[in-house]
Image (cartoon, rainbow, N blue to C red):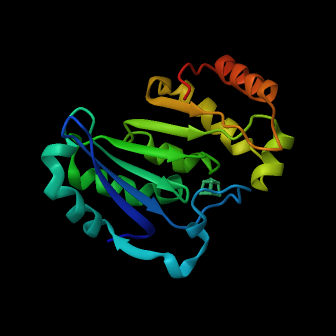
Amino acid sequence: MREAPVIGINRSQQADGSVQLQIAFGSCPLRCKNCDSPQCFERRRWRLYTTQAIVELIEPDREFLEQEGGAVVFTAGEPCMRAKFIADIRSIIGDKIKIVVESALNVPVERVQLLMPVVDRWVIDIKDMNPRIYRSYTGKDNLHVIENLRFLEQSGMKDRIVLRVPELPGLNTPEDRARSTEQLRVIGFEQFV
Ligand code: SF4
């Protein structure tokens, strides 16, 4: 049975009665200047969960998770680094519950290939497409991000993908964000938040 470090679990019930269960992982390959999950990097905040422990959180809410707005949402310290863990959970819970992955996609393409058949919706934080801005913000280059975006688009996944091109205070301008959005449209993406 696999294990993964978790920094937070949050259950929220929507107005329509559906439930979203958010599971935030520890650790991350990036070091974003304004990281919204800094606990990722504090090992003492991690708690190891087995796949079975996550399934036991899911099952009591199955009826509400299966509703239209329901989902299990994997987020924070790069869920793609936990691809096998998530795929194992999918194989146990079946395909009636939606799985959402919130990712920066800066991982080797093999991780994305593993996850592609089990993810219903991807929410991808692009940061910025400009490599200089991206490196200033995250400490890494964005070659994997671009490779993975092309792979997902060529695999016919674009309708499952929503992209985020955020304001990075002091690093990008509205014009930079517009340029990033245009580059992403050229690759083939149409959904932005
Ligand atoms: S990708 Fe997310 S979790 Fe990782 S450093 Fe950036 S903001 Fe933090």
**Picture residue at 17% right of the left edge, 57% below the top:** 59
Quadrant for the C terminus, please.
top right
Horizontal and vertical percent for residue 80? Answer: 52, 52
At 20% from the left and 65% from the top, the residue drawn is 56
Q: In the image, 78: left or right of 146?
A: left
Q: Say left or right for 125 vs 22.
A: right
Q: Position of residue 13 (x, y in %)?
A: 25, 46
* Residue 9 figure quarter: bottom left
Horizontal arrangement in the rendering, residue 117 relative to residue 154 (left or right): left
Which residue is drawn at the image coordinates 56% and 39% (left, top)? 124
Above or below 175: residue 122: below
Q: Give residue 91's position: percent from left, percent from top.
A: 26, 52
- Relative to 124, residue 182 above or below: above
- Front residue of 130 and 148: 130
Return the x and y of residue 117 as percentages of the image width and height.
38, 39
The picture quadrant where one finds residue 30 is bottom right
Total of numbered circles in the picture? 0
Front residue (pair 9, 1): 9
Quadrant into which the N terminus falls: bottom left
